[in-house]
Image (spheres, grey):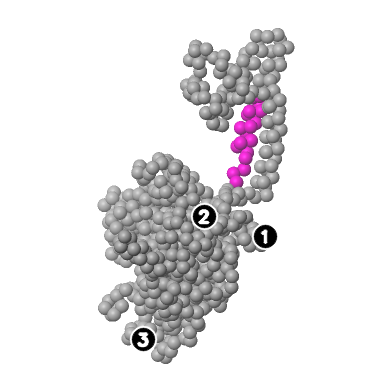
Amino acid sequence: MMWRIAVTGFWLGFAGITGWGREPERAGASRWKQHWAYQPVCRPALPAIVSCASHWERNPIDRFILARLQREGLHPSPEAERPVLIRRLSLDLIGLLPTPEEVDAFASDPSPDAYEKLVERLLASPHYGERWGRHWLDVARYGDSNGYSIDAARSIWPYRDWVITALNNDMPFDQFVIEQMAGDLLPNATLSQRTATGFHRNTPLNQEGGIDVEQFRVDSIYDRVNTTGTALLGLTVGCAQCHDHKYDPLTQYEYYQMFALLNQDDEPTLELASEDQKSRRKRIEQERRQLTRVFQSFDRLTDADVLAWQGKLSTEMRAALPQDINDLLDIAENGRDAAQKARLLEFLRNLDKTRHAVGGLMQSPWMSAAHVHLHLLRNRIEARFKELQTLEPNIPTTLVLAARKETRPTYVHIGGDFTRKGKPVEPGVPTWLLDMGPVRSRLDFARWLVDARQPLTPRVIVNRLWQHHFGLGLVETENDFGSQGTPPSHPELLDWLASEFVRCGYSVKHMHRLMVTSATYRQASKHRNDLANMDPRNRLLARMPRLRLEAEIVRDVGLCASGLLNPRIGGPSVFPPQPEGVFRFTQVPRVWTADTGPNRFRRGMYTHFWRSAPHPALAAFDAPDGVNPCTRRNRSNTPLQALTLLNDAAFAEMSQALARRMEQLNVSDEEKVVWAFRWCLSRTPSVFEKHALLKLYHDSHRNWWPVARALMNLDEFITRE
């Protein structure tokens, strides 16, 4: 008896710690709320710097960086050379290589605003939305399949295209978030705004037999709450699914308040038909109904006729039937599904047509003509049915959210177990972060996330933009701004950027413009001995970091250099070549048929992404898994990456195309080497580099392919200086 009392006491105490079924506030939370990230964003004054270095500064970002460098007794690096700058900008803003002509034009432009003009041209490129859309798709855990073991294909690429378009149009970030979180709840919601809600339909979907459907529906809501926290708040909110957060003020009750906001939706498939497609489909449906009426006027076969026919079949007649028909006849009538019944009707109909056509020839001339006419009419109708199938417009679909008419009740899940319901929960948000009144719907939730007074969202987003340009965020733990995360390396700069983001109306392009036009961004990336001990990880940014390109961009620069790139933007995902055997270990065998037309050479972000078996080249270069939100990709350095660039079918094809381009040039061998080198690396080769490549060419029996492969396998080729 005593041990039961002890155990009960333990669990009651544990429940008190975890907050199961308790009110939101808890002891000690006020202390956690003093954490820097939860304080309002205030625009700091620009720091003072030693005047002799003021000539280096180009915009306010540089003032913060320079002030910190001066405090540490360091100085910034000189500006990079123009070929390096245009390659850096092109890769960062559009993810494509500059052409040699573009490099020459920029290098020789004497105007004082040559750099700024280049920035504006790249920001205006339609490829900007592709480059930065890919970063957001990482956070949105985008994939072209449902995940889990069955991993069936899904159509959600219109959401991907919506992201690209929104970024190209510089949609204000607050609107960008609102449409993705709750576009369907906006007044007179457009197809585009409804498509945007695909953000929270990127959750994996389990289609295995025998599953508890409600369990995986609840799992998808957990995913949506956790992804929202990661993508916009930079908090590990998932830690509060089972108990109060151990290190931050978020309670389990508050977690399920947000859960309740995302628990009131259906998950329909949205058709995206144009007006022309709608009218074509309407005409086809009208004709199909007319043909059906005509067909039924002389074809009155029913399931009863099938049974009557079946009853008359002798053993010899059954032996003459196709095996699949015999198999269907062996199934009891009440056990046949709709498809099986339709197959038997079709077979009997074809028998009937044959009987009429042959029988008519054996009757009187008048009967023969009637039967033949009937036979021909049937054939024409069936042929037209098939023709209408080919004329049916191919209307794209996408996955969206739609608010339910009936409210689902939400409870605290004791220990995170959806079968153990605790206290009922009303929709809401953590008011200690921002109290803007009642938050009762997804739309309210979205507006709360991007409210100008929200302390986390602007800090999180500008930090992530900074991370993509400079390798690491000002807050290195970009997915955890809580008490267990790292403090910002430049706290005043972070708040200045966050306040500027709000001040400029949440223009993402404005923030890019600020970052890339800064003197900090323009620095050379060359190694400096004086930084090796004082700042080995380059957190003070006395030079620009070198960054290996992401998986999709590795493919893109290969397509650029080879001349194969198909620059088309948007549309369904495509199937470039991949090695055989990728699906050997998946539960459901699949066939990957490589595209043979222009789709074969689309950008990497359009490659069809199977969650259970992603394209090997993407996996080799650290593409995310499409299951969890990814706020920062790993950058590994493995032998498999070199082997992929050297031997993968797609990269071999690219190097062959580059070799053909070299062969077709009507210039000397030396000039061909220089031309290819400039295409790949945006600079002129040194004498040593040029001679080494010419030697490789001659040692390879005057074959340009090894030279092309060598260039496209260089570390510098897949690195942004």
The residue type indicated by label 2 comes to Arg
Magenta residues?
378-395
Residue named by callout 3: 70
Q: Is residue 448 magenta?
A: no
Q: Is residue 531 above or below residue 377?
A: below
Farthest residue toward the bottom? 51
Farthest residue toward the right? 366
Residue at 67% in and 60% down = 188
Mark 2, secondary structure of its residue:
helix
Residue at 48% in and 86% down = 45
Determine the main secondary structure of the stretch shown in magenta.
helix
Q: Are marks 1 and 2 in contact (CB under 8 Å)?
A: no
Say whether residue 304 is left or right of residue 681. right
The residue type indicated by label 1 comes to Asn
Residue at 41% in and 77% down = 28
Residue named by callout 1: 188
Q: Is residue 379 magenta?
A: yes
Q: Nearer the viewer, mark 3 or mark 1?
A: 1
* Residue 332: assigned label: none
Q: Which quadrant is the C terminus positioned in? A: bottom left
Mark 1, secondary structure of its residue:
loop
Give x and y (percent) for residue 425. 52, 63
* Residue 201: assigned label: 2
Q: Earlier in the sequence, mark 1 or mark 2?
A: 1
Q: Earlier in the sequence, mark 3 or mark 1?
A: 3
Choose between 527 and 321: the one closer to the eye.
321
Tell me if I can see residue 508 in this picture.
Answer: yes
Q: Nearer the viewer, mark 3 or mark 2?
A: 2
Q: CA distance from mark 3 to mark 1?
A: 55 Å
